Image: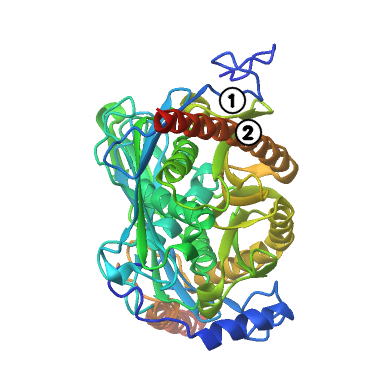
Amino acid sequence: MEGRFANLWRLTVNESKFVESALQSELRVDGRGLYDYRKLTIKFGKEYGSSEVQLGQTHVMGFVTAQLVQPYKDRPNEGSFSIFTEYSPMADPSFEPGHPGESAVELGRIIDRALRESRAVDTESLCVLAGKLVWSVRIDLHILDNGGNLVDAANIAALAALMTYRRPDCTVGGESSQEVIIHPPEEREPLPLIIHHLPIAFTFGFFNKGSILVMDPTYVEEAVMCGRMTVTVNANGDICAIQKPGEEGVNQSVVLHCLRLASSRAAATTKIIREAVEAYNRERSSQKVKRHHTLAKSEVSGPIVVVRKRQQQKKSSGQEKAAEIHFWLWLWWLIVTFWR
Amino acid sequence: MEYVNPEGLRLDGRRFNEMRQIVAEVGVVSKADGSAVFEMGNTKVIAAVYGPREIQNKSLQKKNDHALVLCEYSMAQFSTGDRRRQKFDRRSTELSLVIRQTMEACILTELLPHSQIDIFLQVLQADGGTRSACINAATLALADAGIPMRDLAVSCSAGYLNSTPLLDLNYVEDSAGGTDVTVGILPKLDKVTLLQMDAKLPMETFETVFALASEGCKAIAERIREVLQENTKQLEYRRAA
């Protein structure tokens, strides 16, 4: 928080003393245990690659889009991805519109480092024409409500959006195989991104000169804490990124303790994310119907198409039935005529 | 590509636990209250400290009874091989934030209320480990400016390539795709202030790399102390004459 509105909201001395003394007796203001996380809900939008994550009162949305660009000169076979964070002024009175502040840049870079350096998103599969055209994936994170611990919520939003994103299928063809045809979703099924593992961020807050640590600090706790650390781990036991940006010094043992705490929780959070994504995919595929080129080209949901088909069948069966009756009448007349 | 050959020598001939050569000089910017140049191998950084002085922008002040610490990290456009396009990008913003918070942890800000301490860091030559060099340079400059600190903030980086932990990575080793762990400690208090890590590492390997970086920090702290003591002796000679 910096800028003109940075100090609009200040915690009173009473409140900060209350939070600190409660933590001395291992009590948190919202009644959680020291290492408990708030309730996490993951929802998805209509478009592919849009997610909405709520962690307690913190509300973050993630959107994934992609476009074809020229690759970087030193990596001609790899696609790229970039993360943009938008700290909406409605989330917090200290956020200013326009140029992102320090904490917005830091948040974007923490999540970017975790995804990029640990190779969570496979960039080689994003290559279309080596050296000429690659997919560039762009992840936009919008902070809608700052209830504390934006990093963790934004990280989960980014992961959920990446897992549900489908990029258009494209083929290389034309003369001299230099033309790239991008197929619309009606023609060919869009493809998911290849994600090797899920790096999940866990944020710790330090109090009382580094002797007390909590997980998932709220907005009030963030104003009181003297230091923080974000550890990004995946379910395979790897540490993907650590960010402890200065502030209060802590012992080495505390750092290792935080790493172990984060590693032990990675599997559970990964499961929650995967289950939410799978439920969404199931729901999405049950709504979809195979579209024929002869039928209406517009997006219609399942039931209407089925009804149309049935009407057509009825029509044709009516005609068929008339022809059948005609046939039987003629046969009857034949038998009657030639019986004698 | 082989970063550690079978005899255990790295690309520049160092062993896995050897740091690059350190050259440090204090009092290089005459206008500043404190300044220093810190070189780690080919990485060269200059730090200038102005303060404590009157607060210029009251809206930035968060704590009334503490000094305000501002830090600006920038890389000169000629510092890397290709001329850099912009001086200030997102990396510089993040590093300014991180270094400011690291120095804030070691400055006794409660002794200088209603004042502002500016730390300006300029990278003149970048060959890996610029943030570590910046923190070390800032410590020297703050000491030169006479600003009270609870300990020296020192920093060093370490990595893991070819299954070997390596101390003090240079640019080639850093861009190899392996991990880069930057540690900033307060050596006398034995506390970790800064810790940044990227790329995947299993937990046990991380502990080894972390320990190696901490050892490197302690070695740098010794060197910084020597430089400061030498500087104090020089000042004493000049005063006596």
Q: Are marks 2 and 1 in contact (CB under 8 Å)?
A: yes
Q: Residue at x 40, y 45 (%)?
A: B145
Q: Is residue B109 left or right of residue A69?
A: right
Q: Is residue A298 left or right of residue A124?
A: left
**Is residue A5 visible in the rendered structure shown here?**
yes
Name the spot of residue B3 as percent of width and height, x first: 59, 20
**Residue at which label 1 appears:** B19
Quick one: label 1, few (<14), some, or many (20+) residues within 10 Å?
A: many
**Is residue A185 visible in the rendered structure shown here?**
no
**Residue at which label 2 appears:** B216
Name the spot of residue A316 as percent of width and height, x first: 39, 77
Task: Identify which amino acid the numbered label 1 is placed on.
Answer: Met
- Give the secondary structure at mark 2: helix
> What's the chain of the residue with tag 2?
B
Quick one: label 2, few (<14), some, or many (20+) residues within 10 Å?
A: many
User: In the image, which disc is placed on residue A21?
Assistant: none
Q: Earlier in the sequence, mark 2 or mark 1?
A: 1
Q: Is residue A245 left or right of residue A180?
A: right
Foreground pick, A79 / A9: A9
